Image: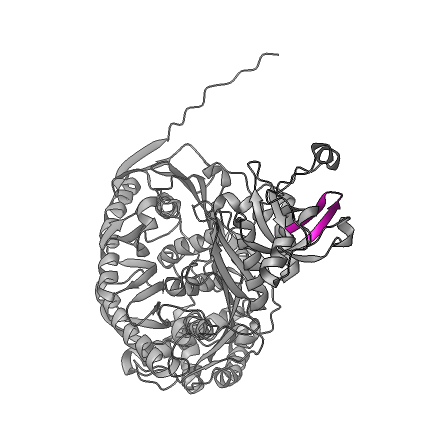
């Protein structure tokens, strides 16, 4: 049979090139994933990310939100590694992948029509990684270009860059070497004229430097947005029409007139439970009166009620400078801080802000407890771990617990980022550290509450943090003209202000500077003026929280650890002696751990970490390790254990894995006929090292120890030169008398 085929030509294949931070950025379309609404292969240096976007033709029924999913997929082949999982394939996304998905989601989501209910899926697949060219940034740009050229309605494009601070200089998209010494890890996303997303971690960066870094990233983003707009002009598809979910204006007005005064009375309280109780009969009354008008789509009424409440809250804030709970615009909710709530935990701190309450618990462990990472970047382990839990009871709901979702992972990472700059180095504090923040009650800003509670918990646990950290959020309400018109910001937003407002600008830091930022928006972006105002308000607020609430409770880290925390001792040994300490098959180190009830971790550079609850046992283990790692010294005395008896003498283990021979002539101060007359296997004896021969064999003397340490008188004379056993004995014994390794 003769098979016939034609050579495939990709007639729609196009490539565009530009430069970003001195490296080539290439966007391609028309060759791969032809059935997606749009596909872009983004290449930055040797980093390749395939970005695809799809959308359903019809809206999803019964949802009151835009159903957008964003997935950033890490493929281990991109860095030339086989996955470390049992199945040797990628399974659930890593935390890094989830956090990147969130970073891409946050700037693109507000640019979709708010009344669209068509499912939209964004998938960025990392296929090749150049360590100097961030795959996360490449994915963000590629996704933006894909949505922009697609037929999906969207008010983009956006661009994103990383910003570093190296030796005091702002650097765009720092290389791997530059990132290693950067004091700032900032991601900035922008539209053509607004800052759309900020995600930052920094070593106590002052407000002005942080602002300048954001603006530097913003200026670079403008160039890439212009580049993508040029691509859209060339190959962009017309946007499809969609069915709007907005309610009929006349019905909306009718329902609002019917219930708005009752809604105002219901919302006017600082107690979330009271508010919910007041709203319930209003919902029932609205449904009773209007359900017939919405037969088959009664859920639409709940959407309208959401819009009514949104209108009330925003009007109060914008027009009357009135907050739901009666506070002033820049007034923080009532605060409380406590420590030592859990007797057996290594450290605990409770932080309460209004009806938001977070309990943070610190656990200390040996260095071996550090989290092992299997990702695409150079980081292989994490010594400081922060987890955040958000149970359903914290908001009065009854959902079963199903493990952490993307939100929980994101908030935990934010708290971790905020506190990491003040965590002492492993040389200063040789522990793995885990903090778990349990949200007990939630009415806004739980992530920032977890940062405050975790600072309390760390100091209570005796972790010598460099400075206490506090976190606070800033909200935004814009008018009809958006961010360019009349706007207002308010500090410490609660649930309703977050829900109905335009911004959640979270800033954490010490009194010296910022350690973390996360900005969530419902508008297209922020002007520089709004960012500056947010920095000013959050700086004042976190200083107040530190000075007035947290530090009066615990002013500095405790000097002593909890009696239930492991005690850690460190020492440095010659790296060549690591094998001696470990022993064949780990026998020596396991014996030490079992004997002293400790854990021992040894680094490749010879650093040894010994941890255990009993400090005396830790010290004992340290002495044994020192003994093993130090060559026996002629003239030194050792306490050893008799391990074997031979006709010519006894073998004594002076350290795990190190044996020496006590010749029969040197067992006692008098003549010995039989070895068994003086010692038996298992006896503890004091011996003196009298010789180490050219083959490394150790010769010991109990006789010398008795004379010199106990003052006993010798009853016979012996040769001063240590005697060797006969070779035939050596041969029959099968032991060469060298220390065991």
Q: Residue at x 66, y 37 (%)?
A: 736
Measured along the vertical axis of the image, is residue 207 above or below residue 646?
below
Q: Is residue 650 magenta?
A: yes
Observer-nearest residue: 585 or 327? 585
Residue 509 visible in this rendered orientation of the protein: yes
Q: Quadrant of residue 32?
A: top left
Classify the position of the N terminus by image quarter. Answer: top right
Observer-nearest residue: 313 or 491? 491
For this orientation, the residue located farthest to the top is: 2
Residue 70 visible in this rendered orientation of the protein: no
Main secondary structure along the magenta-highlighted residues:
strand
Residues rendered magenta in the picture: 642-653
Count up the numbered dots: 0
Query: In the visual, does 17 lie left or right of 579?
Result: left
Measured along the vertical axis of the image, is residue 626 above or below residue 290?
above
Measured along the vertical axis of the image, is residue 396 above or below residue 629?
below
Q: Where in the figure is residue 176, as x and y percent of width and height?
A: 34, 45
Classify the position of the C terminus by image quarter. Answer: top right
Q: Residue at x 33, y 80 (%)?
A: 547
Q: Where in the figure is residue 357, as x and y percent of width and height?
A: 48, 78
Q: Where in the figure is residue 112, as x and y percent of width and height?
A: 38, 56
Q: Where in the figure is residue 125, as x and y percent of width and height?
A: 46, 42
Q: Quadrant of residue 53?
A: top left
């Amino acid at each position: 049979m003769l098979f016939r085929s034609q050579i495939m030509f990709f007639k729609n294949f196009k490539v565009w090139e530009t430069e970003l931070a001195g490296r080539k950025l290439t966007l391609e379309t028309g060759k791969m994933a032809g059935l997606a609404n749009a596909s872009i292969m983004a290449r930055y240096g040797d980093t390749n990310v395939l970005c695809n976007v799809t959308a359903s033709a019809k809206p999803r029924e019964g949802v009151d939100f835009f159903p957008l999913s964003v997935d950033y997929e890490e493929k281990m082949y991109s860095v030339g590694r086989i996955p470390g999982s049992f199945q040797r394939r990628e399974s659930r996304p890593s935390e890094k992948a989830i956090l990147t998905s969130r970073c891409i989601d946050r700037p693109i989501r507000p640019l979709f029509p708010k009344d669209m209910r068509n499912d939209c899926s964004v998938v960025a697949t990392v296929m090749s990684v150049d360590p100097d060219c961030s795959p996360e940034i490449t994915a963000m740009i590629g996704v933006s270009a894909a949505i922009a050229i697609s037929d999906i309605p969207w008010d983009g494009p956006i661009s994103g860059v990383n910003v570093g601070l190296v030796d005091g200089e702002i650097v765009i998209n720092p290389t791997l070497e530059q990132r290693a010494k950067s004091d700032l890890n900032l991601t900035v996303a922008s539209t053509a004229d607004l800052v759309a997303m900020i995600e930052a971690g920094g070593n106590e960066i002052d407000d002005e430097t942080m602002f300048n870094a954001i603006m530097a990233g913003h200026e670079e983003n403008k160039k890439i947005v212009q580049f993508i707009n040029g691509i859209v002009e060339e190959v962009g598809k017309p946007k499809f029409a969609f069915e709007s979910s907005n309610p009929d204006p006349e019905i909306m007005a009718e329902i609002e007139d019917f219930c708005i005064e009752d809604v105002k009375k219901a919302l006017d309280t600082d107690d979330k439970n009271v508010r919910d109780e007041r709203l319930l009969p209003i919902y029932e009354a609205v449904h009773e009166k209007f359900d017939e008008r919405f037969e088959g789509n009664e859920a639409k009424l709940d959407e309208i009620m959401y819009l009514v409440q949104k209108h009330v809250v925003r009007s109060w804030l914008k027009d009357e400078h009135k907050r739901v709970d009666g506070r002033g615009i820049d007034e923080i909710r009532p605060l409380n801080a406590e420590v030592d709530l859990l007797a057996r935990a290594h450290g605990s701190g409770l932080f309460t802000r209004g009806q938001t309450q977070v309990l943070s618990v610190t656990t200390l462990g040996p260095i071996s407890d550090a989290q092992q990472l299997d990702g695409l970047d150079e980081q292989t382990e994490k010594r400081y771990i922060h987890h955040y839990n958000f149970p359903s009871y914290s908001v009065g709901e009854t959902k079963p617990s199903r493990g952490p979702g993307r939100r929980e992972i994101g908030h935990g990472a934010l708290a971790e980022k905020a506190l990491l700059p003040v965590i002492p180095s492993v040389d200063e504090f040789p522990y793995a550290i885990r903090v778990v923040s349990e949200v007990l009650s939630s009415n806004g800003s739980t992530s920032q509450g977890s940062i405050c509670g975790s600072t309390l918990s760390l100091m209570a646990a005796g972790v010598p943090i460099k400075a206490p950290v506090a976190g606070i959020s800033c909200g935004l309400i814009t008018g009809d003209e958006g961010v360019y018109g009349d706007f207002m910001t308010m500090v410490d937003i609660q649930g309703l202000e977050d829900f109905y407002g335009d911004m959640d600008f979270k800033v954490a830091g010490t009194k010296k500077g910022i350690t973390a930022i996360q900005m969530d928006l419902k508008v297209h972006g922020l002007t520089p003026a709004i960012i500056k105002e947010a920095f000013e308000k959050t700086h004042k607020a976190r200083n107040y929280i530190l000075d007035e609430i947290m530090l009066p409770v615990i002013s500095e880290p405790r000097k002593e650890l909890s009696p239930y925390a492991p005690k850690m001792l460190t020492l440095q040994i010659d790296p060549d002696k690591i094998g001696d300490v470990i022993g064949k098959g780990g026998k020596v180190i396991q014996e030490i751990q079992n004997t002293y009830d400790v854990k021992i971790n040894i680094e490749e550079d010879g650093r040894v970490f010994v941890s255990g609850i009993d400090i005396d046992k830790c010290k004992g283990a340290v002495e044994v390790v020192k003994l093993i790692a130090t060559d026996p010294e002629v003239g030194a005395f050792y306490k050893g254990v008799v391990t074997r008896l031979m006709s010519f003498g006894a073998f004594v283990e002076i350290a795990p894995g190190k044996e020496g021979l006590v010749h029969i002539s040197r067992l006692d101060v008098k003549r010995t006929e039989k070895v068994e007359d003086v010692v038996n296997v298992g006896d503890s004896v004091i011996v003196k090292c009298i010789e180490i021969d050219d083959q490394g064999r150790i010769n010991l003397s109990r006789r010398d120890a008795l004379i010199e340490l106990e003052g006993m008188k010798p009853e016979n004379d012996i040769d001063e030169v240590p005697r060797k056993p006969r070779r035939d004995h050596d041969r029959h014994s099968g032991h060469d008398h060298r220390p065991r390794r």
